[in-house]
């Protein structure tokens, strides 16, 4: 697995790289600002990118914007976001209409190298890892309770939404019409209490609800 690390704190960046290399991970780039991250990704085409949200020069959302660009231009590339704080809008926007090959972790929750390498491997394989505190912040309790109200077919559809599949892809996999899938998804929105704001955010919030429920089972 080949990765690029973007972290403005030199000591943290170098320590992370040394530990990962010692564990057999190939670190093909280490950068300290968002512009250099994009350049490194274009040059090296890593399997996974690890980046902070707030990076130089303004320490606001440079890292997040670079990650969004990477997810848009390189959809098969994994992105692992490490942050000191919960930033719900950033998490929702980064996840976008698909939550596959993505992780959003709080730095103080990454307790060991083995756990972190496991996250990298999960994202590399197409999976999703989102810190429980971030998910809880994004979802209200009504959504948690409503999962039990979904029919078996609606749960199946929601699980495919959580995997990042489009309505058309879900229809092909379930061998039903896209119109049927649309009806199931509208029902899921209603039962989860998701307001008709940006549709992509509803998909992400529904996917997060499914992922959190799956972790608890």
Image (tube, rainbow, N blue to C red):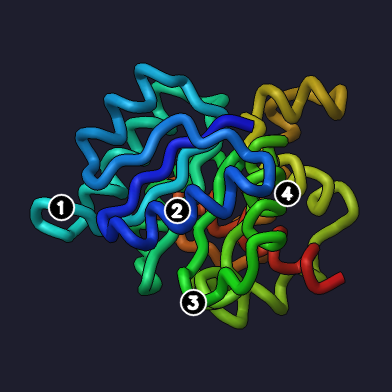
First in residue order: circle 2 vs circle 1: 1
Of marks 2 and 3, the one in the foreground: 3
Q: Secondary structure at mark 1?
A: loop
First in residue order: circle 4 vs circle 3: 3
Of marks 1 and 4, the one in the foreground: 1
First in residue order: circle 3 vs circle 1: 1
Mark 1 and mark 4 residues within 8 Å of each other at the beta carbon: no
Q: CA distance from mark 2 to mark 3?
A: 13 Å
Which residue corresponds to mark 4?
158
Q: Secondary structure at mark 4?
A: helix
- Disc assigned to residue 56: 1
Mark 4 surroundings within 10 Å by alpha-carbon count, few (fewer than 14), some (14 through 19), many (20 or more): many
Q: Residue at x 49, y 76 (%)?
A: 108
Which residue corresponds to mark 2?
81
Q: CA distance from mark 2 to mark 1?
A: 16 Å
- Disc assigned to residue 108: 3
């Amino acid at each position: 697995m080949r990765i690029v690390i973007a972290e403005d704190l030199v000591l943290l960046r170098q320590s992370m790289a040394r530990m990962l290399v010692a564990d057999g991970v190939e670190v093909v780039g280490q950068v300290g600002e968002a512009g250099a991250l994009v350049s490194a990704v274009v040059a090296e085409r890593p399997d996974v990118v690890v980046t902070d949200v707030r990076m130089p020069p303004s320490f606001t959302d440079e890292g997040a914007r670079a990650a969004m660009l990477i997810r848009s231009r390189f959809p098969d590339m994994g992105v692992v976001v490490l942050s000191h704080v919960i930033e719900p809008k950033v998490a929702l926007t980064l996840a976008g209409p698909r939550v596959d090959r993505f992780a959003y972790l709080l730095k103080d929750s990454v307790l060991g190298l083995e756990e972190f390498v496991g996250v990298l491997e999960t994202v590399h394989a197409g999976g999703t890892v989102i810190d429980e505190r971030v998910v809880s912040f994004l979802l209200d309790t009504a959504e948690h309770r409503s999962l039990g109200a979904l029919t078996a077919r609606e749960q199946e559809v929601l699980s495919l939404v959580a995997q990042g599949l489009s309505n058309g892809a879900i229809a092909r996999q379930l061998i039903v019409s896209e119109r049927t899938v649309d009806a199931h998804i509208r029902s899921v929105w209603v039962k989860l209490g998701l307001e008709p704001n940006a549709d992509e955010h509803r998909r992400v919030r529904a996917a997060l609800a499914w992922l959190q429920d799956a972790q608890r089972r």
